[in-house]
Image (cartoon, helix red, strand yellow):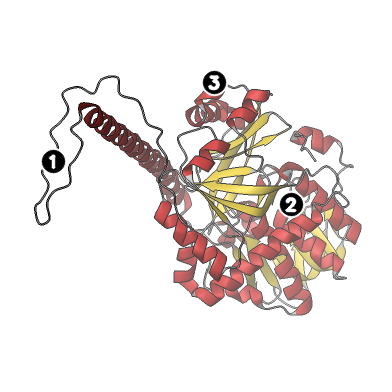
Amino acid sequence: MSETFTSVSQEEAGLRDRVRLSFDLDADICVIGAGLAGLTVALEAARLGASVAVLEGRHIGWNASGNQLGTVMPGFALPLTDLIERIGLEDARELWTLSKQGAEFVRANASEESMPGMGLSDGVLEVSNVDAGDRLISQLQMLNEDFDTEVEGWQVDRVREALKTDHYFHGVYYPKAFQVDGRKYVHGLAALARRAGARIFEDTPVVSIDHSGIRKRIVTPSARLRASHIVLAGNIHLGAPSKRLSETLLPVWRYAGVTAPLGERLHEIVAFKGSVMDSDGVDHFRVVDGDRLMWESPETTWAARPQRFAGAIKRRIRTIFPELGNVEITDIFGGATGQTVHGMPQIGQLRKGLWVASGFGRQGMNTSAMAGQMIARSILWGDERWKLFSPFELVWAGGATGRVAGQVVGIWGRASSAAAGALARYRERARVKDRQREARLAEANRAAGTGPRRAPPGVRPRPAPPPKAAVGAAEPVVHEDRVSQ
């Protein structure tokens, strides 16, 4: 089914009037934050029979959860090799399995029966900005053998057949990864949670939290709520009620744009139908609405109007796919995510009855789904797998100084990626020229009858003299070296 891009304003226009909490209420679980993680907790807990109240200071999906590309695949922001080094192979396997289960939770919810119009489609391609053949072999072996994940290694020629650009080299294809309309999914999740019995209150900011005692107390501007468990799922926007938690996250604003219709030329240049992301985390894009390109690239640690980044997105598209020319950006959107210092999400119990699900910046939709499922089952079933995340503690993100440092590191990372990519393309062109030169030399030797002769045994052959002329020699067809899997 083809995906139809819908702007946030159109999406919101179809929602029923928002309901504020204006009366005192008791519930088994109070979830603070109506983003992907909070709504998943609410949905799963309500399905398991708990009474759930969700408090949202603004409206459902107003931030990053309602403004993302909708790519769903296993894994975390922390590279797999670093995860193994940090917690060991066995625990890393368990976390990876949980991340795959989170992805399947999204797939099940985003079915046409549950959420019509999600436009679910399969296939995600991670491409390298440099020639990384050896690293690719190691990654494929580890994912296949140690983590039971179906992946394919794509050679350079196959990547460039699907994406007409010399910026990308090898690729890793995840056939079971998928994408949905990310900007619709969060509202579909809210509808499912309501249907299961959860109550969602918007325009209801939390003023204070008293998490002592068996029944926790939450104060809002117009009502009070009591609950046995509180789940903090508000990321960087929790504010004063949980300032310590907010300060463990580095706020990063990520922006994306959608082009005007580009016609058939888009499919000639971008033939891959799923999501594409580069290995350095700089670009993330896919085709939507048949012939439009949705592209996510710029980021900053300071809030700004999304429209300011239209030019940056256009330049990035032109850099990667110059044949598309100067495209028109018709829609810009973005939101702030909370990124942790250690690169893993924050999932677990801070103290008895007080839970956290945050730090999902650069993590992907599978991880917030996994966190929501896990916390609901931990509360209601006593599932203790959340303890797998205990090595990743709450670490202060550095405040304003951390933001400056994060911006500098981000700029440096993108510049390093660009430099490494330029060097890789230069080396590739140099190899091609060397092969062409050698082929012309061999052709000239054959034409002059001075081809190499076999030397007698024990005698080191002398190199053939250079030809006097090689002008007009035929250009050979150059084949890329292949990477064995």
Can residue 48 be seen here? Answer: yes
Can residue 21 be seen here? Answer: no
> Circle 2 sits in a helix, a strand or a loop, which is it?
loop
> Would you place residue 266 above or below residue 118 in this image?
above
Query: Measuring 10% from the left and 51% from the top, which residue is drawn there?
Result: 460
- Give the residue pinned by disc 1: 463
Query: Measuring 59% from the left and 57% from the top, which residue is drawn there?
Result: 151
- Amino acid beneath label 2: Pro
Left or right of residue 281: residue 241: right
Q: Position of residue 76 (x, y in %)?
A: 56, 59
| Cα distance between the residues tagged 3 and 1 | 49 Å
Nearer to me, 297 or 178: 178
> Would you place residue 28 above or below residue 301 in this image?
below
Q: Position of residue 462 (x, y in %)?
A: 10, 43
Q: Position of residue 231 (x, y in %)?
A: 71, 65
Badge 3 or badge 1: first in the primary sequence:
3
Left or right of residue 157: residue 45: right
Nearer to me, 406 or 377: 377
> Circle 1 sits in a helix, a strand or a loop, which is it?
loop
* Mark 3 vs mark 1: in front: 1
Nearer to me, 329 or 171: 171
- Give the residue pinned by disc 2: 205
Query: Measuring 34% from the left and 25% from the top, which residue is drawn there?
Result: 474
